[in-house]
Image (cartoon, coloured by chain):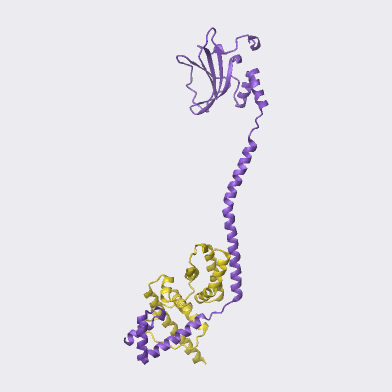
Amino acid sequence: MAGSQAGLAELIDSHYDSLYRYAYRLSGTSADAEDLTQETFGKAIVSLEQLRDAEKARGWLYRILRNAYLHRVRDEKRRRCVPLDSLGDLAAEKVETVAEIDPGALQAALNELDETFRTPLILFYFEDFSYRDIAEQLELPIGTVMSRLARAKAYLRRRLAQYDHADHGAA
Amino acid sequence: MDCRHADLLMLFSPRDLVSADSLALEAHLQSCAACTARHAASRSAETSLRRSFAAVPMDAAAKARTRSGLLHRQAAMVRRRMLNRAGLPASLLLIFGLGLGVRHQLRPTLDAGDFAYREQILLEAPQQAVELWLADRRLPVPPFDLNFDLYLTHGTQTIDGREVPVMTFVRPVPGGERVEMAKVYAVRRADFHLDRLKDAQASLVNATVIRPADRVDLVWVVIHTTPTMEPFLKPRGQDLASAS
């Protein structure tokens, strides 16, 4: 059934939206997101017959998408990433209030993050992945996931607060 | 639980906290206003971020396009796989069938009349029949006049893995039950080293080597039970027909 037309249609209908959102947040543009999502399903079709457990489809598709994304950006030097040191320490975290978040500012802040921080953040915030899910997805120890998430969250809040202040200041 | 411990637990997603830690954090928050404020701010920021992360503009047309393209692609892939799966056996079957057909077509038709005619020629004119057989094998007529009244048979004999054409002649011994025999072999230089080949004798059989003057690639070897091969040649100055 998994390899049939109905199986594929069901897979697309169930996961397209979330994969597209994940791809959008990873890549930052709708065109890249569409390409990545399409590429993910394209690769999934080839080995769809091997997917015995439908419960595992989500994690499987996310892994394909992330690998496809990493493959694309591997040689790109254009991305300016924030050095790990500048993300701060857990103990130094101070909760910044972020009232309304500008989508452009959010994506800009995400794009500044190294992929190793950006991916867990995206998985955590909008696909309802638990720490354990993320650890499994990224094949990392759960402690590493927590640490990366905490530092990435703190960085994100600081950057968004800066945007917010700049906006209000400009107004 | 102190505030430092509570701060640590607040880093966790509620889903990742074990129930004991979750209850302990809840109890601490009820008794600590500062932590409650931080927790509320954190939750508010989380909620806001979560909402913002999910706020990705969706393109319904792109989704429909992708869906349709993928379904077409899968259908094409399934067709290709089916063709591939069926293709190999079909190709083999076709090749086998063609081979069988060609072999079937190339099989000579055996005609009993033709069969009988060929045997009759052998009986009536064995010399001509044998000469035709030699010509088919690009072999010349032997440079000695064999007496075809004594002809028995012809064919090939395997010698050291090589097929060597041979003619057999027999001759009754006058007054006895025994027969004398001579076998005439056409030995090609391409098949054997012939430079040192020469006449030989055994207790019952003799070998005579004849090298034709006009063919360096061929040697005739006559094995005969008589002292010489003379008894198997045409009587001198006598016509074959009158001799018989």
Q: Nearer the viewer, residue A44 or B209?
A: A44
In the rendered image, the residue lying farthest to the left is B2
Q: Which chain is yellow?
A: A
In the rendered image, the residue lying farthest to the top is B175
- In the image, residue B132 above or below residue B85: above
Q: Is residue B116 visible?
A: yes
Q: Nearer the viewer, residue A7 or B222?
A: A7
Rendered location of residue A12, percent (x, y): 55, 70
B196 displayed left or right of B133: left
Split into 4 quadrants, where in the image is the N terminus of chain A?
A: bottom right
Q: Quadrant of residue B32?
A: bottom left
Q: Is residue A74 visible?
A: no
- In the image, residue A90 above or below residue A50: below
Identify the residue at horizontal 58%, vertical 13% (top origin): B233
Rendered location of residue A62, percent (x, y): 48, 71
Rendered location of residue A151, percent (x, y): 40, 80
Q: How many marks?
A: 0
B67 displayed left or right of A115: right
Q: Nearer the viewer, residue A148 or B209?
A: A148
Rendered location of residue A153, percent (x, y): 43, 81
Q: Quadrant of residue B82?
A: bottom right
Q: Nearer the viewer, residue A46 or A31?
A: A46
Q: Which chain is purple?
A: B
